[in-house]
Amino acid sequence: MALSTKNHVTAIHTLSIGNLNSSIVHPREVFKVCILANAASFVIMHNHPSNDPTFSPEDIQLTQRLMKAAEIIGIECLDHVVVTHDAYHSMKEQDLMDLH
């Protein structure tokens, strides 16, 4: 989700459709959407078909890569949310959005 300076949604895009246990997302696709939507910030969201909303090591690694790139580009990554049929986990709520 690309967001305005007032955190209004300016765009929602599907960047990748994965298979049973993985999906590939590259930062350039995320930032292309954000730049074209004039976003001030963004939130990454995806599902876990396993119905376990726990962040995988790959989820955490992707978020760290996006946050580093976001710092350079000037578009803030506000959160990474995993959703399942009946639950969700937020990296921000779990204090996992710190690069240090």
Image (cartoon, grey):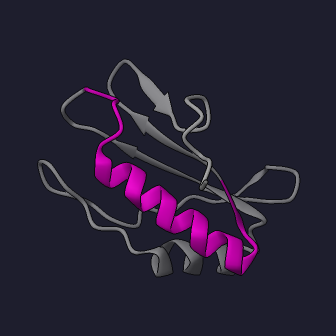
Q: For the point 41% across and 38% down, which residue is it?
A: 82
**Residue 36 spot, x, y in % from top left:** 66, 80
Magenta highlight range: 52-77
5 lies above or below 32: above
Residue 42 among those drawn in magenta = no
**Residue 35 spot, x, y in % from top left:** 68, 79
Q: Residue furthest top?
A: 86
Q: Nearer the viewer, residue 80 or 67?
A: 67
36 lies above or below 23: below
**Taking 81 as reference, is 38 left or right?**
right
**Taking 74 as reference, is 42 left or right?**
left
Picture quarter with the N terminus: bottom right
Residue 53 sits in quarter: top left
**Residue 59 spot, x, y in % from top left:** 36, 50
Q: Residue furthest front?
A: 100
68 lies above or below 72: above
Q: Nearer the viewer, residue 69 or 25?
A: 69
Q: For the point 27% across and 60% down, which residue is it?
A: 17
Q: For the point 44% across and 27% down, which residue is it?
A: 88
Residue 75 among those drawn in magenta = yes
Prevalent SS, magenta region: helix
Picture quarter with the C terminus: bottom right
